[in-house]
Image: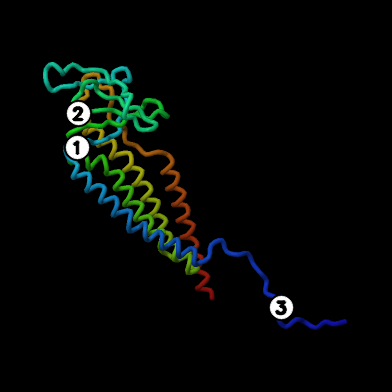
């Protein structure tokens, strides 16, 4: 009976990693591009809005009285009587209805609403805007771009540590917690700035005593809060993993 052992046993094949270091580094490079491009685009969009003063500005407002959607034609005495907004048959973007003032001058104030949703909010288009109105109407997009850029930068550091087979380095818990904070900041900005812009435009154009539209209420949805909580839990898991890794290194 031959009991000779094989001096070169075949290596055991374990499960293949889900992502190779090369793929992770590619994702890190993409995150770097986003981190550089997103803030630049957001700031450029905001600066461009500052140059659009006296042009039209678009803000989202809430409908408070559908039956009283009317705006004074003014400013001459014979046109001060409020008139009901009428649906335009032309110039409608796909999926929207444009409600415009009849017999108004060129570039009139108008409202646009989606066909797919109930008439709860409308897009108010008002001419002769001011610089603060333009900035506030675009501030949510600019802040979102900055948050995306910062989040991509933090994600890049996390991906590089994973590519180096050191996912539990101390800085990763702070990176994930930072992304959670950016999610909350972006959610607040997406609600507060449109509300402030709508309030400023409505205060200038004065919709009339019936007040068919009003500024949006600022708030934050449940989704961003849940996403931030999940990220904070993940950050705590990484922090504990980092502590365990240090303890193991101390025992070796």
Counting residues from the start of the chain, the first of labels 2 and 3 encountered is 3
* Along the line of sight, the residue nearer the viewer: 70 or 233: 70
Residue under numbered circle 2: 106
Q: Is residue 59 visible?
A: yes
Q: Are marks 2 and 3 in contact (CB under 8 Å)?
A: no
Counting residues from the start of the chain, the first of labels 1 and 3 encountered is 3
Whole-angstrom CA distance, mark 2 to mark 3, is 86 Å
Which image quarter holds the N terminus?
Answer: bottom right
Residue 61 in which image quadrant: top left
The colour scheme of the drawn protein is: rainbow
| Circle 1 Cα neighbour tier, 10 Å, few/some/many (<14 / 14–19 / ≥20) | some
From this viewpoint, which residue is outermost toward the left?
77
Which image quarter holds the C terminus?
Answer: bottom right
Counting residues from the start of the chain, the first of labels 1 and 2 encountered is 1
Mark 1 against mark 2, which lies toward the viewer?
2
Looking at the image, is 156 positioned above or below residue 61?
A: below
Disc sitting over residue 55 in the figure: 1
- Dot 3 lies on which element? loop
- Dot 2 lies on which element? loop
* Along the line of sight, the residue nearer the viewer: 184 or 140: 140
Q: Residue at x 47, y 52 (%)?
A: 233
- Dot 1 lies on which element? loop
* Along the line of sight, the residue nearer the viewer: 207 or 175: 207
Q: Position of residue 17 (x, y in %)?
A: 57, 64
Residue under numbered circle 3: 9
Left or right, 236 with respect to 74, comes to right
Q: Position of residue 11 (x, y in %)?
A: 67, 74
Q: Residue at x 20, y 32 (%)?
A: 127
Looking at the image, is 91 positioned above or below residue 182?
A: above
Q: Residue at x 34, y 51 (%)?
A: 147
């Amino acid at each position: 009976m031959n009991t000779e052992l094989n001096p070169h046993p075949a290596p055991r094949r374990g499960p293949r990693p889900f992502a190779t270091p090369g793929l992770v580094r590619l994702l890190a490079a993409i995150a770097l591009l986003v981190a550089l491009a997103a803030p630049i685009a957001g700031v450029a969009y905001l600066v461009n809005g500052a140059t659009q003063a006296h042009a039209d500005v678009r803000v989202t407002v809430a409908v408070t009285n559908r039956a009283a959607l009317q705006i004074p034609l003014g400013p001459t005495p014979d046109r001060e009587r409020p008139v009901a907004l009428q649906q335009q048959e032309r110039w409608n973007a796909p999926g929207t209805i444009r409600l415009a003032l009849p017999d108004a001058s060129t570039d009139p104030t108008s409202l646009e609403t989606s066909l797919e949703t109930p008439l709860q909010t409308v897009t108010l288009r008002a001419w002769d805007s001011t610089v603060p109105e333009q900035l506030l109407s675009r501030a949510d997009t600019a802040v979102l771009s900055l948050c995306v850029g910062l989040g991509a930068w933090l994600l890049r550091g996390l991906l590089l540590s994973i590519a180096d087979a050191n996912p539990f380095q101390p800085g990763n818990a702070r990176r994930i917690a930072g992304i959670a904070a950016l999610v909350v900041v972006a959610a607040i900005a997406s609600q507060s700035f449109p509300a402030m812009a709508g309030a400023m435009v409505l205060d200038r154009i004065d919709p009339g005593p019936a007040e068919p539209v009003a500024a949006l209420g600022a708030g934050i949805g449940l989704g961003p809060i849940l996403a931030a909580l999940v990220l904070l839990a993940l950050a705590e898991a990484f922090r504990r993993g980092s502590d365990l890794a240090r303890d193991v290194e101390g025992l070796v």
